[in-house]
Amino acid sequence: MLAIPDTTPGSEWLNVVLDMRYDAATGTLFTLDRMGGKVAEVDTLGTLVRTYGGGRGQGPMRCAT
Amino acid sequence: MTDYSYSRASVVFLDRGNTKVLVFPRRGSRVTQFPVPAAYRSIALAADETVLLVPGTGAHAVDVYSAAGDPVGGIGAFEELPVRCAPNEDCERTRRQCMGCVVRVLGDAVLVMNTELDLMTVFAGEGRPARSLDLRARLARLREWIATDEPLLARMQERADARSSGATVPVVLKSYFNNVHASPDGRLAFSVKPASPVLQSSGYQYSLLDVETLEVESVGFSDHSHGLRATGWQTVFGVQRGTYAIYRFQD
C-alpha cells in the first residue's frame, strides 16, 4: 500500500523511525523517532493525528516538565 | 533506548533514565507521570490500563503498576525467565552490549523476551503456569529460508554490489529491539535484519510468530536504504490485518 504523501501544515517529517506499530483498533500507526523520545500517531494516508512526548516540534502533546 | 506502549486510551513512555513513566491520553491533554523505583528495561500497557514493566532483576519477571503509578503486584518469577540479562553489560551469549528484556502484551498473554527475541516466556493469565519458548531453531529455519530465497538474495547482492564491489552476502539475522509487537491476528510481529556491514541498512525481514504453534511465517522484506532517505523518502512499515504493508511518507 502506498500512502499519498501528506504535505499539509499539520504534517511533519518522520525522518528515520526506530519503530512502527499498527493499532488495529483505530487503524493508525505509531512511529518512534530516531532519538527514541517522541511517538507520532499517523493515519494510513500519512496524516499526522498527534504526537506524544518529545517536548519539542509540532504536535499538541508536550512532555510535562 | 526509550520504550513505549499504547492502549485504546493511552500512550505510555518509559523515559530515558528508565525511572519514570509518562502517561499521555490519546484524547485530551492531561499528561501524567509517576516515578518507579528501578531502572526498568521495557514497558507494555495492558488493555485494562495497568502498566507492565520488566525490571531485569528482583522477584518478579514483570512488575505491575496501576495507571496512577501504584504498585499492584507482579507477574511470574524472575527466575523463570530463560535468559536473565544484565542490561548494559556485555551479553555472555551475543558478546555485545545487552539492551535488556522486552515485554509485550499479546491478547491475554504477557510475553517477556530477550533482546534477540529468540527466547521468551509466555505468562498466559493468572494461575496458569508460564511457558518458555526457545525460538532459535525456528529463526534458524527462517534464516535458511532467506538464504535460499534467490530473488531476495539477488536484490541484496545487487545492492551490495552497488555499494561495495565484490562483497559477499552473509545473511545473519539480528532481531530489532523495539520492532516487536502484537499483530491484529494475534501473532507476534517482529523484524529481523541482516547483520552484515554491507547489508546493515539494506532491509528488514518481517515475520509473524504464532506463540502456540511456534510457527514463524516470513511475510515480507522491505528496503530501508540511505538512498531512499537521500531522496526525501522514508519507507516504514506496519502490520495491517495480518499482512505487512509498506508506507511511504514525504516531507
Image (spheres, coloured by chain):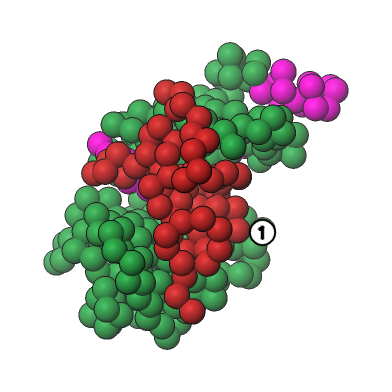
Q: Is residue B250 left or right of residue B62?
A: right
Q: Which chain's residue wears label 1?
A: B
Rendered location of residue A10, percent (x, y) = 47, 45
Q: Which residue is mark 1?
A: B96
Give the farthest residue toward the right. Answer: B165
Q: Quadrant of the N terminus of chain B?
A: bottom right
Give the farthest residue toward the front. Answer: A9
Query: Residue at horizontal 57%, vertical 33%?
Result: B250
Image colour assigned to chain B: green
Q: Is residue B133 left or right of residue A9?
A: left
Query: Residue at horizontal 42%, vertical 63%?
Result: A61
Query: Residue at horizontal 40%, vertical 74%?
Result: B21
A3 shown above or below B74: above
Q: Is residue B120 visible?
A: yes
The reply to whether the magenta stretch includes residue B157 is yes
Q: Is residue B114 visible?
A: no
Q: Magenta residues, as a range?
A: B156-185
Query: Looking at this view, is A40 or A23 the one in front?
Result: A40
Q: Label 1 amino acid?
A: Arg
- Mark 1 packing: few (<14 Cα in 10 Å), some, or many (20+)? few
Query: Residue at horizontal 45%, vertical 27%?
Result: A3
Query: Looking at this view, is B152 or A63 the one in front?
Result: A63
Q: Is residue B151 left or right of residue B170?
A: left
Rendered location of residue B182, percent (x, y) = 32, 46
The reply to whether the magenta stretch includes residue A56 is no
A30 shown above or below B32: above
Rendered location of residue B193, percent (x, y) = 58, 38
Look at the numbered disc 1 and give the secondary structure of its residue. loop
Image colour assigned to chain A: red
